[in-house]
Amino acid sequence: MISPERGLPSTFDPSTGQNVKWSVELGTETHSTPAVAGGRVLIGTNNGHPRDARHTGDRGVLMCFDEQDGRFRWQLVVPKLSKDIYQDWPRAGIVGSPVIDGRRVYMLDNRVEMVCLDLDGQSNGNDGPFLDEASFQAPLDAPPIPVNEITADILWTFPVLTNTGSYPHDSAHTAPLLDGAILYFNTCNGVDNTHRKIRAPDAPSLIALDALTGRWLARDGERMGPVIFHSTWSSPALGEVNGHKLVIFGGGDGILYAFHALSGSASPPPPVQTLQRIWRFDGDPDAPKSDVHRFTGNRRESPSNIKSMPVFHRGRVYVTLGGDVWWGKNQAWLKCIDATASGDITRTGEVWSYPLQNHCMATPAVHDQRVYVADSGRRAHCVNARTGQAHWTHDLDAEVWASPLVADGKVYFASRRGTVWCFADSPEMKILSQVKLGEPIHASPIAANGVLYLATMTRLYAIQEAAQGKPLAP
């Protein structure tokens, strides 16, 4: 959530087109954060506004746009997972965020399949080894839908449920971590429709694939399943300690784990390896640890979980955790952990703990010894990264699910009421602007090539200083 981009605007106005390079319609629900590379902009959404009349009804969709003008290029259309709405929530679409490496795209779709795509789509032919896009994009028991010029080009797939036995809850919600030829991601294991039973207690929560072939390389051996309170939400992160790479992961059991990263060569033969744990940190050690689902719906007492991605910075890890926003207690924290230790560091690894106003979905941004985050208690926080003391807080107009972005001396927050707040990146609070977009924002803002990207539930904006786009009708 830190960008080196410069010259980003502090404000914009869709009603006049001021500083709007372009904007495009998405589906009717968008939770995915966009990714920009290779002249393309990718974002997950739903099929609420179909781009291909052959695809009707509820679907997950990954859309690809031209970076320069927002022209639609191609889409991956994914039918729903099953009739169990708690595995693939209606109209949620593709929730996870894509990762781009060269001309390859990696993304976990709404059926919990890791897919590797060609960034160029079908424009350079249907590349293999996967060649059956026609069947992939058709609902179960329906005839194949032939490939056309706006159909995504799938290179390989890894069906997570078939291979790992995990049981997803609500949606597939992760951004994969790419480290050379190794791809790490969350399997989204969670409760069933009763919210009181884990159907797959022995399934892994974190797995690693060969990014070139999709071969399964490794899994965690922590057996988090029985104490997952709701679901496994977090995305893995990477850090280096004393010359060794660590994969840092927030489990659905509310515990932060650090694993030895696999070697850069994705060549180990079967069987699937077990990731070697270096340390574990329980950020809420006094919370219930057994029969956890008896606390479902309890806003005063419950286990904690981790929805945000942990952030590694200068030998420390910053993470938000606490009660589940839907089913758990209100209490939540921003914590700083010493990443250089080993073993169970629950009682020894905490550097500081900062209480948040309420549940927290957002990944913190750490910059220039300041940590920025906003919570579901409608409050933005700027915290000293060394001491955990607040520089400032500010009440926003609504709860915040999106993570903040720090770039160009500015900090951008986006609320569920649709307001984009821009603050100065400073230990003294200064509001630079508020822009009201009129509908919830769940996607985090990002910046690339001098452009700020913001997605509401139904629209993606490319914001650039001195741009003059077409005014949007009120």
Image: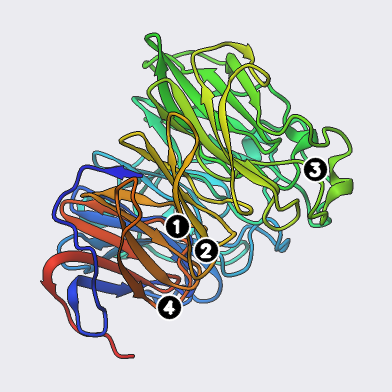
Q: Which residue is mark 4?
A: 49
Residue 276, compared with residue 409, is above or below; it is: above
Residue at left offset 69%, top offset 39%? 166
> Could you tell me how far apart the alpha carbons at marks 4 and 1 are, in whole angstroms?
16 Å
User: What quarter of the picture does the C terminus occupy?
Assistant: bottom left
Please tell me which of labels 1 and 2 falls first in the chain.
1
Numbered mark located on residue 32 in the image: 1
Please tell me which of labels 2 and 3 falls first in the chain.
2
Numbered mark located on residue 93 in the image: 2
Please tell me which of labels 1 and 3 falls first in the chain.
1
SS class, disc 2 = loop
- The answer to whether 333 appears left or right of 127 in the picture is right
Q: How many labels sit on residues?
A: 4
Q: Nearer the viewer, mark 1 or mark 3?
A: 1
Residue 100, compared with residue 61, is above or below; it is: above
> Could you tell me how far apart the alpha carbons at marks 1 and 2 are, in whole angstroms?
9 Å
Residue 319, compared with residue 379, is above or below; it is: above
Q: Which residue is mark 3?
A: 199
User: Mark 4, residues whose alpha carbon is within 10 Å: few (<14), some, or many (≥20)?
Assistant: some
Residue 249 seen anywhere in this rendered image of the structure: yes
Please tell me which of labels 3 and 4 falls first in the chain.
4
